[in-house]
Amino acid sequence: MRHDIKIKYYPIVIFFVILSFVFVVIHLEYKKYAWYYISAYCACKECCEGYADGITASGYVLTETSKVCAAPKNIPFGTRFDIPHYGIATVEDRGKAITGDRLDIYFSDHDKAIEWGVKKLHVKRLN
């Protein structure tokens, strides 16, 4: 008789184990996302003041097709973000105004950087 009870509740136990696993996976995936204020810059003197030489704080040389961003010091160089409407950007730069929940993405054209403005976006951290 006791054996029948174990068999009767076995599917329910399996269901809750699987459900728990799904919640853990969803939670871990969600932790990769955060809200950031995304501003934009280019390598001109107006955007970079005295650092308008086309070389980032990490030593990366900017090109027309570079997809890089400036991030706060607590985010290491090489960290990659999937930024909506921009693509995957690698942290290669710093900025004195880039703190907390801010990222600054690079455009090769000053007008495109100005056009971007500042957007609050849900960004995925890839590594």
Image (cartoon, rainbow, N blue to C red):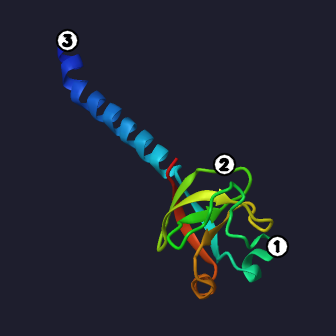
Give the residue drawn at x 63%, y 84%.
Answer: 110
Residue 18 coordinates in the image, percent (x, y):
31, 35
* Residue type, mark 3 in image: His
Q: Which residue is mark 2?
A: 76
Give the residue drawn at x 53%, y 58%.
Answer: 81
12 lies above or below 79: above
Query: Could you classify mark 2 by the number of other residues whose Cα lies within 10 Å: few (under 14), some (14-19), or many (20 or more)?
Result: some
Instruction: Out of 47 and 81, give the one closest to the viewer.
Output: 47
Answer with mark 3 or mark 2, whichever residue precedes in sequence.
Answer: 3
Quarter of the picture holding the N terminus: top left
Answer with mark 1 or mark 2, whichever residue precedes in sequence.
Answer: 1
Give the residue drawn at x 67%, y 75%.
Answer: 43
Report the mark closest to the observer, 1 or 3: 1
90 lies above or below 38: above
Query: Could you classify mark 1 by the number of other residues whose Cα lies within 10 Å: few (under 14), some (14-19), or many (20 or more)?
Result: few
* Residue type, mark 2 in image: Pro
Mark 1–mark 3 Cα distance, whole angstroms, equals: 78 Å
Q: Which mark is residue 3?
A: 3
Residue 79 coordinates in the image, percent (x, y):
58, 51
Query: Could you classify mark 3 by the number of other residues whose Cα lies within 10 Å: few (under 14), some (14-19), or many (20 or more)?
Result: few
Give the residue drawn at x 80%, y 65%.
Answer: 96
Answer with mark 1 or mark 3, whichever residue precedes in sequence.
Answer: 3
Residue 14 coordinates in the image, percent (x, y):
27, 29
Q: Which residue is mark 1?
A: 50
Mark 3–mark 2 Cα distance, whole angstroms, equals: 56 Å
* Residue type, mark 1 in image: Gly
Q: Do tag 1 and tag 3 residues touch (Cβ < 8 Å)?
A: no
Instruction: Out of 83 and 51, give the one closest to the viewer.
Output: 51
Left or right, 44 with reference to 34:
right
Report the mark closest to the observer, 3 or 2: 2
Q: Which mark is residue 70?
A: none
The image quadrant of residue 4 is top left
